[in-house]
Amino acid sequence: MSFRSVIIRGCLCLLLTIGFAEPAGAQEYDPAPLRTPATLPADGLPASQGEFIQWLETNAASVPRERQAAVREHVYALISANVKARVAAGFPAFPGERDSALADLFSWGDRLGVFGAYRVARALDATRPHLPPANLVPRPFEITLDSGYFTFESSRPRWAIRFPYYFMLGAATHQRMGTDFEGDVIVLSTLFAPNDPAIGSASQATILLIATDSAAADRGENFWLNNLALDKTPTGDDLLPGTRDYRGFDTALSMNKEMVSIPIPGGVMLIAYLGLTGTFEANRPHFLNLLESLRTTH
């Protein structure tokens, strides 16, 4: 077992037993994903931030539904490029000063449906008027921003995670899954990174979080193993004692997949990590960081 694995096990064991009075996983995220090349997706949208903002001002209102996800992701591809350029130049990942250009991107992220993006826009440019946020996370969730990190909390079952401001929070719902159980469903997207050359272009990896109560634990796990087409035999290479870890690979899509099932007080947390070959490996340290940040209450 590697030294890092020992550290992860120890951190997770502690974090799953502490109460909400403690800060949510105060560790810094691994800088390695920020040092990967800043490659934009091949989506046909302007590569220059200035040209893209002008394009949005003219076209955003008329983008067809099937194209909206690509436009929203392009905003975050430019955010990824901006953050990586800051780190490459020796600056902190989160600007400590006003950055109106980066604030513009997050303002558009909010208008295009990304939860929490307006908080970053205001933090980076507090001197100019801002429109009211277009997207507030629904109950039972709350999101706050501090020093470049979001803390995202749910009250049923009670849990919280911490992730960097450049993650894209695309969905946060408490919903019915299958026919007879419900729970929290959260979708996060990581930094953009280059895909394997055989695939081409660049993409984000996806982190999917599902929390259900203990009565639905087995049904929830089976439901998502089926939906993600994962092998139902645990790998045995658990990141935390008491968890079950599953992995899979979609050859047709070059999609890498893994899911960790974590018992939490009153329920179960399923955290899945999905990505094309290339971006999956580049961003996986941030998936491990997110696992480290998980906390719950009894």
Image (tube, rainbow, N blue to C red):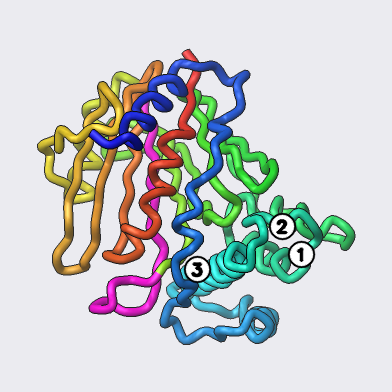
User: In the image, 260: left or right of 237?
Assistant: right
Q: Position of residue 262 (x, y in %)?
A: 32, 28
Residue type beneath disc 3: Glu
Separation (CA) of disc 2 from disc 3: 21 Å
* Residue closer to the observer: 34 or 203: 34
Q: Which residue is mark 3?
A: 73
Q: Is residue 222 above or below residue 46?
A: above
Q: Is residue 175 above or below residue 199?
A: above
Q: Position of residue 203 (x, y in %)?
A: 40, 68
Quarter of the image for residue 100 reads bottom right
Residue interval drawn in magenta: 194-213
* Residue closer to the observer: 175 or 55: 55
Does the segment drawn in magenta span residue 196?
Answer: yes
Separation (CA) of disc 2 from disc 1: 7 Å
Q: Which mark is residue 72?
A: none
Q: Which residue is mark 2?
A: 95
Q: Which quadrant is the N terminus positioned in? A: top left
Residue at far top of view = 298
Does the segment drawn in magenta span residue 184?
Answer: no
Q: Which residue is mark 1?
A: 99
Give the SS element for disc 2: loop
Separation (CA) of disc 1 from disc 3: 20 Å
Label 1: how many Cα within 10 Å (few below 14, some 14–19, many 20+): some
Label 3: how many Cα within 10 Å (few below 14, some 14–19, many 20+): many
Sequence-earlier tag: 1 or 3: 3
Q: Is residue 38 above or below residue 15?
A: below
Disc 2 or disc 3, which is closer to the eye? 2
